[in-house]
Image (spheres, helix red, strand yellow):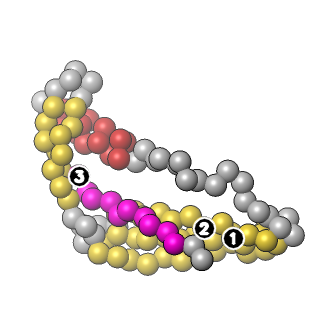
Amino acid sequence: MKLFLPLAFAGILLLSACDNNDDQAKTVNKEGGIEVSLSTSHLDSLKDLLTTHYIVWRKGAKIKEFDKTDTVPSLGKFYTEGENNNGDTQSVNVRKDYEFYVTVK
């Protein structure tokens, strides 16, 4: 039973990390384009780190690559059901993650 909770928590984290890349660009226009990727990571129980990574392309060459970071308040934790390999379920406490919504003009 002591081994179950950490395994269930690890399973929940792995499942929450799965990406749905339906809208992901397949190629980047390297003649004049800017790649942007957004990510968050948990710093502590009160703060999350928001990282925006930029790659600027011009005439087929990468001319600049940089990151911008900022701290944002953590969304806290919530309880959810976790299941181990034996099919046993238990309620586990996991951190909430931000959702990204991007508007491009």
Residue drawn at the location 35% of the way across and 47% of the way down:
16
Question: Left of 33 or right of it: where is 90?
Answer: left
Gap between marks 1 and 3 measured at Cα:
34 Å
Residue annotated with mark 1: 34
Say which label, 1 or 3, has the lower sequence index. 1
Callouts 2 and 1 close, C-beta under 8 Å: yes
> Residue 63 location in percent, x, y?
79, 74
Residue annotated with mark 3: 94
Judged from this view, the residue extending furthest toward the right is 59
Q: Is residue 25 shown above or below 12?
A: below
Out of 27 and 8, give the one closest to the viewer.
27
Q: Nearer the viewer, mark 1 or mark 3?
A: 1
As for residue 99 lying within the magenta part, the answer is yes
Question: Left of 76 or right of it: where is 56?
Answer: right
Q: Quadrant of residue 95?
A: bottom left
Out of 99 and 2, give the one closest to the viewer.
99
The stretch in magenta equals: 94-103
Q: Nearer the viewer, mark 3 or mark 2?
A: 2
Gap between marks 2 and 1 measured at Cα:
6 Å
Gap between marks 3 and 2 measured at Cα:
28 Å
If the image is split into quadrants, where does the C terminus sit?
bottom right
- Report the amino acid beneath label 2: Val
- Report the amino acid beneath label 3: Val
**Residue 10 in sight here:** no
Residue annotated with mark 2: 36
Magenta segment's dominant SS is: loop
- Report the amino acid beneath label 1: Ile
